[in-house]
Amino acid sequence: MLMYERVIREAQTPANLETYLNGPLLRRLWADLFLPLPVRTAWQSRFTELAAKAAAA
């Protein structure tokens, strides 16, 4: 989970995200990740399935 938190906060390019993040695993971990609110909000607005996961948690 720590690696996912860091990649989400610090990735420099979309290629970094594609290299280090696995979509199904990210969806499973999403509600438990410690992320700054602006980062979480930005991701949830772009990926609505993450917002749904957060609301269900």
Image (cartoon, rainbow, N blue to C red):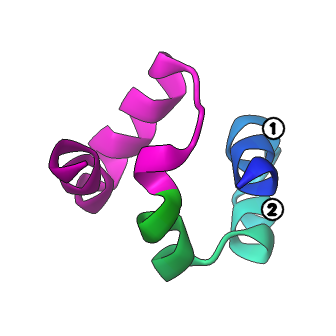
Q: Residue 6, percent across and down?
A: 79, 42
As rendered, which of 4 and 38 lies closer to the eye? 4
* Mark 2 → mark 1, Cα distance in angstroms: 9 Å
- Numbered label attached to residue 16: 2
Which segment is the magenta one?
Answer: 30-57
* Image quadrant in which you'd find residue 17: bottom right
Residue at 77% across, 52% down:
13
* Image quadrant in which you'd find residue 18: bottom right
Residue 24 lies in the magenta-colored region: no
Q: Is residue 3 left or right of residue 57?
A: right
Q: Residue 16, percent across and down?
A: 80, 62
Helix, strand or loop for the magenta stretch, by majority: helix
- Work out whether mark 2 precedes mark 1 in sequence or the reverse, and give the earlier one: 1
Instruction: Give yes or no for contact between labels 2 and 1 (Cβ–Cβ under 8 Å).
Output: no
As rendered, which of 25 and 14 lies closer to the eye? 25
* Count of number-bearing discs: 2
Residue at 68% across, 69% down:
21
Give the secondary structure at mark 2: helix
How would you rate the neighbour count of disc 1 (Cα within 10 Å): few for under 14, some for 14-19, many for 20 or more?
few
Does 42 appear above or below 26?
above
* Image quadrant in which you'd find residue 43: top left
Q: Quadrant of the N terminus?
A: bottom right
Residue type at tag 1:
Glu
Residue at 46% across, 53% down:
30
Residue type at tag 2:
Asn
Give the secondary structure at mark 1: helix
- Numbered label attached to residue 10: 1
How would you rate the neighbour count of disc 2 (Cα within 10 Å): few for under 14, some for 14-19, many for 20 or more?
few
As rendered, which of 2 and 46 lies closer to the eye? 2
Residue 41 lies in the magenta-colored region: yes
Q: Residue 34, percent across and down?
A: 60, 33
Residue at 72% across, 36% down:
9
